Amino acid sequence: MDDSSAHSARPAFFRWLAENLARFAGTWIAVGTVVFAVVALGDGDGFDAPNSVDELLSVPFVFVAVVAIFAFATAIALLFVFPAVMLSLAAYLLALWWSARLVGPPWDRVLAVALSPVLSIFAVSGGIDSLSLSVVVASLAYGFVAELPRAKTRRNDRGLRLGQVPAR
């Protein structure tokens, strides 16, 4: 590998890393919001049916406000636990970067999902509860949405990708 190809590979890796960090944060916020909503409704408080037209018309606004509050709380929780998650996320992304480039499609997605429990090691080490189960579910969901690294396409002397059959 010459210096120019090594230099061009660095921005691709950092772009891939930034996209995966954003996908991880989005997955964490989405799954955490659902978990917070289920826990809040499962505590027995429930909710009362609207008694008037004004209350009925306010239901969509209340729903949006509650989802926004849960998403904000989940984002704050991500900031607090990110130092603990960072090590397992780094291990997962490095394993994904090297191994998915070796196996290629369609096994790279299977590999991404199979490696995703690495993200939840910190959560289940203290025992199983609703929070640790939500982290396991979030890590599995992230395995499905993680951006996969793409190896450079190698071509043969006729300009076809390796393994590609020429059109007749």
Image (spheres, rainbow, N blue to C red):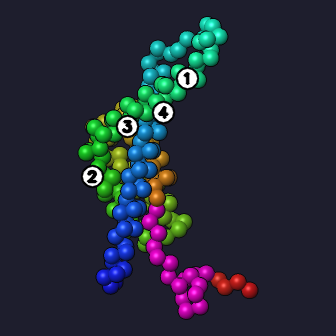
What is the secondary structure assignment of the residue under circle 4? Answer: helix
Q: Is residue 133 visible?
A: no
Please tell me which of labels 4 and 3 falls first in the chain: 4
Residue on which the image places disc 2: 87
Can you say whether 49 is above or below 68 in the image?
Answer: above
Please tell me which of labels 1 and 3 falls first in the chain: 1
* Screen quadrant of the C terminus: bottom right
- Mark 4–mark 2 contact, CB under 8 Å? no
Residue 75 is marked as 3
- Callout 4 amino acid: Val
Task: Give the quarter of the image for residue 57.
Answer: top right
Can you say whether 111 is above or below 44 in the image?
Answer: below
- Callout 2 amino acid: Leu
What is the secondary structure assignment of the residue under circle 1? Answer: helix
CA distance for labels 4 and 1: 18 Å
Residue 126 place in picture, x, y as percent? 27, 37
Please tell me which of labels 4 and 1 falls first in the chain: 4
Residue on which the image places disc 1: 61
Task: Give the quarter of the image for residue 151.
Answer: bottom left
CA distance for labels 1 and 3: 21 Å
Task: Give the quarter of the image for residue 33.
Answer: top left
The residue lying toward the viewer, choosing from 140 and 2, is 2
Q: Which residues are magenta?
A: 148-164
Q: Is residue 125 visible?
A: yes
Residue on which the image places disc 4: 34
- Callout 3 amino acid: Ala
On the rendered structure, is 134 left or right of 127? Answer: right
Report crowding for label 1: few under 14, some 14 to 19, many 20 or more residues within 10 A (C-alpha).
few
Q: Which tag is nearer the camera, tag 4 or tag 3?
A: 3
